[in-house]
Image (cartoon, rainbow, N blue to C red):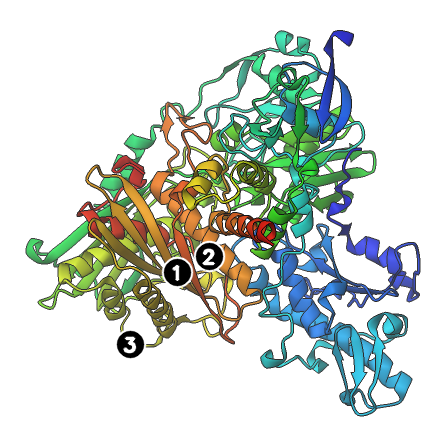
């Protein structure tokens, strides 16, 4: 089984896994590494509940194999540094059931890392891959705008 | 490294008895630091709630939530009510999730009834605990109890300025007899400190850090993962199985056939074949390698399009009478009669977290960890299938990643229990999205006829309504081929129109799949029917629709439907306590009219639509502003809604539930359709069963009308008026009248 020995860099920590290299990283982090913040929603890249960052870029963990992340740096919700977004999410009391929210936060953080002051259309565009069945979209949008605003105010002061 | 399931703390009544030593009357000051819990022993009164409050020596207040959290905020709402009567400091509250236990009364978290049914009892529980603390302080200070009050975890004697913390009093308080309910003094609403406040949800931090544990996240030592392939046509079973390739997949441990269901579906597993593996991926891959042929089924020829056509024909012929107001009319002259038929397809619940349960069956019984809306029914069904007693089943309620009614059917809990029993290890059964869409308990396909004879004033003189859909009753009894009385109570017979002659009938509709209840249940199709028809009447009469609703509802009164051939169920509520109150319809209509006037007025190709609906003892009006461009592309621009659900515990959660209900209603109205061909569901995932996305989401403005009226339902009542409000707006903007949902059959969405 040593053929299947895979090295993973997740949230800045190194893990060695004996697993099928074709296994989507979603199942590896959840079932084998016990980090369950990355959620299953569709298994087909349609809902965004499993969004992670690979070298800072948002990706769907359900469609990304372990092989594809060799030598790359993976961030999951457990390792996401996004205090301002979390604060804004809390201020707007965004979550309902909360199940999709780790994916929403991962997508929002990826957006803000590239675009400090996104327009509403840019938010729609960046977030349109993340489904929320509870319907928290208006609050997600408000929270992203608020987090962007607070970063701007901080930058100015 | 594995997360533990204790993120949601679970105490059963038995545990608490043990912890607090209440059976012996003593105190247990064990490792938990909890020292006191007031509890009324059950006394054979099922509805008497009795196990909600414990106070630690450290002054922490442990409040039990006995109902399931699925996004509605109940783990915040119930503790708010308890904390208010108690006089607790919200920062010292720790929420404890109750296990399945009949002594809580019903824990079935559906029907929008947790606060509706629990509000008064939760207040009593809080007041009972407060009284005991006050009694302890009264004896300590030798003052009359009437001079004492509580606030912020303190008992206060205002005259002397003395105060003492709950934690200090807890041990002494526990020695007093429990006060009788009739002796309790409840707070006046103006003195509420937590009820009516927009407290943040208690699970916020865990959700934002990814540490909150949902049913899907449960992991136990030695646990196996199961992926189950179920019959593609309801009623078929495995004819041949070749699992040789599946067993070769790395990580696959076993392949097990599930028992074939018999009779009405109820909450039986559907049968099929389970692949057991050491991780989810191996189970999924193993399942793909199974070679199965399926037997024939009576439902092999089910075709939803043909079936719907049949329903449309049936509602045009006489059916079974379910309500008659005034004299029956047989006079329908063509020139003054307006008639329309509305249809809604099958719908799937699609919570973001599909059904999931983990079971561990041992010699002593079965422990279950499940995303369940109904822990008691889960225990009952698991016990029945395992041949155990209900007391041998321990059900841990884990956070639900959405429910919408799907997770009050515990078939998936039974699957996990049966597999664990056979394998003698913990087993987690995770439904895939495809499983959820193709093997669920669908919202029924339906057709509704609405017909009116108009007078010279263009107002209806007589009306006729017919509805036809496979009944939820068919899930529990074979041969239930007509809508049940309680189903027509949901928005069909209970619309209080002041029309001289009004007749309501049902028609036959046989089920070909498992039919279940989904958020707002039959109010979905009935709200769409009546909400659309009133708009058609308004157009005919050339009146604003809000005026047509006012005129049709008539004078302010409380409708009781006496002598109309039916007894109205009113969602299990007394009509005196929760009346069908015309004034409250007027209230939400007016609030929405106000909201519509704010902001920019409709431009070219844009228009408002409106509908109002009472369900689950709450009143909701919704107006939507849409644009339909020259290419028939729809854009929903704004939503204005008002909800009157009486007393409000957490206004922010009432608002968020109403926002969510609008999204849920838009998803189903714009795009929702499950169809069958040759007995099989045609859709499989979010590409062909789409849900609303952020780009389709309108700006939303919700007004919460709060009053001292008893609390009504909140989670569901926002859904029914959405679909008609949308199609009415589309008509006003484009002249296209959509009577057949979803809208995506007619416009680009």
Decide if residue B693 is in sight here.
no
Mark 3 is surrounded, within 10 Å at the Cα level, by few (under 14), some (14 to 19) or many (20 or more) other residues, namely few
> In this rendering, would B610 be left or right of A72?
left
Residue reaching furthest left? B335
> In this rendering, would A135 be left or right of B720?
right
Percent across and percent down for residue B183 are: 72, 82
> In this rendering, would B319 be left or right of A71?
left
The local secondary structure at tag 3 comes to loop
Q: CA distance from mark 3 to mark 2?
A: 28 Å
Mark 2 is surrounded, within 10 Å at the Cα level, by few (under 14), some (14 to 19) or many (20 or more) other residues, namely many
Percent across and percent down for residue B21 are: 90, 60
Q: Mark 2 and mark 1 in contact? Answer it, CB < 8 Å.
A: yes
**Label 1, on which residue?**
B641
Percent across and percent down for residue B654 are: 51, 61
Quadrant into which the C terminus of chain B falls? top left
- Which of the chains bears the disc numbered 2? B
**Label 3, on which residue?**
B555
Q: Mark 1 and mark 3 in contact? Answer it, CB < 8 Å.
A: no
Decide if residue B562 is in sight here.
yes
**Label 2, on which residue?**
B658
Q: Is residue A138 above or below residue A42?
A: below
Residues at marks 1 and 3 on the same chain: yes
Query: Which residue appears at 35% of the width and 54% of the height?
Result: B638
Query: Which residue appears at 35% of the width and 44% of the height?
Result: B669
């Amino acid at each position: 089984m040593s053929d299947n020995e895979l090295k993973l860099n997740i949230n800045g920590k190194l893990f060695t896994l004996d697993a099928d290299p074709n296994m989507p990283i979603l199942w590896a982090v959840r079932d084998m590494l016990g980090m369950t913040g990355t959620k299953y929603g569709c298994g087909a890249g349609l809902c965004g509940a499993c969004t992670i960052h690979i070298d800072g870029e948002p990706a769907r963990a359900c469609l990304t194999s372990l092989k594809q992340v060799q030598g790359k740096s993976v961030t999951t919700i457990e390792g996401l540094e996004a205090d301002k977004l979390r604060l804004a999410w809390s201020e707007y009391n965004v979550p309902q059931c909360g199940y999709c929210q780790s994916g929403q936060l991962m997508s929002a953080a990826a957006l803000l890392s590239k675009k400090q002051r996104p327009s509403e259309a840019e938010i729609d565009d960046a977030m349109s891959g993340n489904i929320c069945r509870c319907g928290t979209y208006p609050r997600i949008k408000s929270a992203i705008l608020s987090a962007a605003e607070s970063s701007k105010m901080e930058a100015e002061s | 490294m594995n997360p533990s399931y204790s993120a949601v703390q679970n105490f059963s009544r038995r545990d608490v008895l043990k912890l607090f030593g209440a059976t012996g009357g003593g105190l247990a000051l064990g490792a938990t630091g909890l020292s006191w819990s007031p509890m009324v022993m059950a006394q054979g009164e099922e509805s008497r709630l009795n196990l909600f409050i414990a106070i630690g020596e450290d002054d922490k207040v442990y409040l039990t939530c006995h109902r399931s959290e699925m996004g509605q905020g109940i783990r915040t709402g119930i503790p708010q009510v308890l904390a208010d009567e108690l006089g607790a400091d919200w920062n010292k509250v720790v929420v404890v999730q109750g296990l399945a236990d009949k002594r809580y009364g019903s824990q079935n978290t559906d029907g929008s009834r947790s606060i509706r049914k629990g509000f008064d009892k939760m207040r009593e529980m809080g007041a009972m605990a407060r009284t005991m603390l006050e009694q302890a302080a009264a004896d300590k200070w030798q003052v009359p109890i009437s001079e004492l009050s509580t606030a912020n975890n303190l008992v206060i004697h205002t005259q002397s300025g003395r105060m003492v913390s709950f934690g200090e009093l807890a041990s002494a308080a526990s020695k007093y007899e429990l006060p009788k309910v009739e002796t309790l003094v409840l707070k006046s609403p103006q003195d509420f400190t937590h009820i009516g406040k927009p407290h943040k949800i208690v699970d916020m931090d865990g959700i934002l850090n990814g540490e909150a544990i949902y049913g899907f996240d449960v992991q136990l030592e030695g646990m196996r993962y199961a992926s189950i392939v179920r019959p593609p046509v309801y009623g078929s079973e495995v004819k041949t199985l070749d699992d040789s390739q599946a067993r070769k997949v790395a990580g696959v441990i076993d392949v097990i056939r599930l028992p074939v269901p018999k009779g009405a579906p109820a909450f039986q597993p559907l049968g099929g074949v389970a692949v057991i593996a050491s991780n989810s991926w191996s189970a999924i891959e193993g399942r793909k390698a199974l070679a199965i042929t399926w037997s024939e089924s009576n439902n092999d020829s089910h075709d939803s399009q043909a079936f719907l056509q049949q329903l449309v024909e049936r509602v045009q012929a006489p059916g079974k009478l379910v309500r008659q107001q005034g004299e029956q009319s047989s006079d329908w002259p063509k020139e003054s009669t307006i008639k329309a038929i509305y249809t809604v397809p099958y719908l799937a619940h699609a919570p973001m977290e599909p059904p999931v349960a983990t079971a561990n069956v041992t010699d002593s019984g079965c422990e279950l960890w499940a995303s369940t809306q109904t822990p008691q029914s889960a225990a009952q069904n698991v016990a029945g299938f395992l041949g155990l007693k209900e007391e041998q089943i321990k059900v841990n309620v884990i956070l639900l990643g959405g429910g919408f009614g799907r997770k009050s059917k515990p078939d998936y809990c039974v699957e996990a229990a049966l597999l664990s029993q056979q394998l003698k290890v913990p087993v987690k059964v995770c439904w895939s999205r495809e499983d959820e869409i193709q093997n669920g308990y669908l919202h029924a396909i339906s057709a509704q006829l609405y017909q009116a004879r108009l007078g010279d004033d263009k107002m209806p003189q007589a009306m006729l309504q017919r509805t036809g859909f496979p009944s939820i009753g068919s899930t529990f009894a074979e041969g239930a081929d007509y809508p049940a009385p309680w189903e027509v109570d949901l928005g069909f017979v209970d619309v209080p129109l002041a029309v001289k002659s009004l007749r309501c009938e049902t028609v036959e509709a046989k089920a070909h799949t498992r039919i279940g209840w989904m958020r707002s249940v039959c109010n979905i199709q009935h709200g769409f029917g009546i909400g659309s028809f009133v708009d058609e009447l308004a157009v005919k009469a050339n009146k604003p629709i809000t005026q047509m609703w006012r005129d049709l509802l008539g004078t302010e009164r409380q409708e009781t439907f006496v002598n109309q051939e039916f007894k109205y169920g009113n969602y299990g509520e007394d009509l005196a306590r929760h009346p069908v109150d015309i004034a409250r319809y007027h209230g939400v209509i007016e609030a929405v009219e106000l909201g519509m006037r704010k902001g920019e007025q409709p431009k070219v190709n844009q228009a408002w639509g409106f509908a109002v609906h009472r369900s689950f003892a709450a009143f909701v009006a919704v107006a939507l502003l849409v644009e339909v461009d020259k290419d028939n592309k729809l854009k929903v621009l704004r939503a204005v809604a008002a909800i009157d659900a009486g007393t409000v515990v957490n206004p922010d959660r009432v608002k968020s539930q109403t926002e969510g209900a609008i999204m849920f209603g838009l998803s189903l109205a714009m795009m929702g359709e499950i169809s069958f061909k040759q007995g099989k569901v045609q859709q499989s995932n979010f590409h062909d069963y789409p849900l609303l996305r952020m780009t389709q989401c309108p700006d939303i403005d919700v007004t919460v009308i709060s009053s001292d009226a008893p609390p009504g339902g909140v989670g569901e009542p926002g859904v029914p008026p959405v679909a008609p409000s949308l199609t009415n707006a589309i008509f006003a903007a484009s002249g296209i009248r959509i009577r057949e949902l979803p809208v995506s059959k007619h416009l680009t969405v």
